[in-house]
Image (cartoon, rainbow, N blue to C red):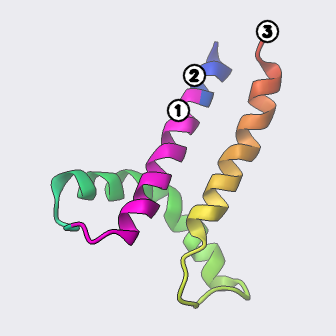
Amino acid sequence: MISGSLIILLRIVNFLILARVIISWLPIDKYNPLIQFLYQITEPVLAPARKLVQRSAIGGGMFDFSPIIVLLAIDLLIIPLIARLPF
């Protein structure tokens, strides 16, 4: 039960990060309340990964790899949770 709820929560965070990445490529007003809400929700998750990337050899470049790192980490968390679910 708890692992199922956690999987749903992680999938929602996954979806929000993907939405943020797609929106960052589009010419959408960043001051739109929905866009600001999306950034406020995802920034606490992305900021630590961004700091790790900046300290690494690939940091300081033109691309932000933090969403990729967070999406991979979320998937790595979900895999053992799915294995624990009764089928």
Residue identified by numbered label 3? 87
Q: Main secondary structure of the magenta part?
A: helix
Mark 1 vs 3, N-terminal side: 1
Q: Residues within 10 Å of mark 2 (few under 14, many from 20)?
A: few
Which label is found at residue 5?
2
Residue toward you, 19 or 40: 19
Q: Tell me: 50 left or right of 57.
A: left
Give the spatial CA distance, label 3 vs label 2. 15 Å
- Identified by mark 2, the residue type is Ser
Who's the residue at 54% across and 76% down the image?
Answer: 64
**67 or 3, nearer to the observer:** 67
What amino acid is found at the position of numbered circle 1 in the picture? Answer: Leu
Q: SS class of the residue under badge 3?
A: loop
Residue corresponding to mark 1 = 9
Q: Residue at x 49, y 54 (%)?
A: 18
The residue stretch that appears in magenta:
8-28
Compared with 65, 16 (above or below) is above
Q: Is residue 29 above or below residue 18?
A: below
Q: Is residue 2 left or right of residue 16?
A: right
Asked which secondary structure carries label 2, the reply is helix
Quadrant including the N terminus: top right
Q: CA distance from mark 1 to mark 2?
A: 6 Å
Image position of 86 with respect to 48: above or below: above
| CA separation in Å, label 1 and label 3 | 20 Å
Name the residue: 73% across, 88% down: 57
Give the residue drawn at x 42%, y 53%: 19
Q: Quadrant of the C terminus?
A: top right
Residue 52 placement (x, y as % from top left): 65, 74
Mark number displayed over residue 65: none
In percent of width and height, residue 42 lies at 43, 54
Are the residues tagged 1 and 2 within 8 Å (C-beta)? yes
Q: Is residue 24 magenta?
A: yes
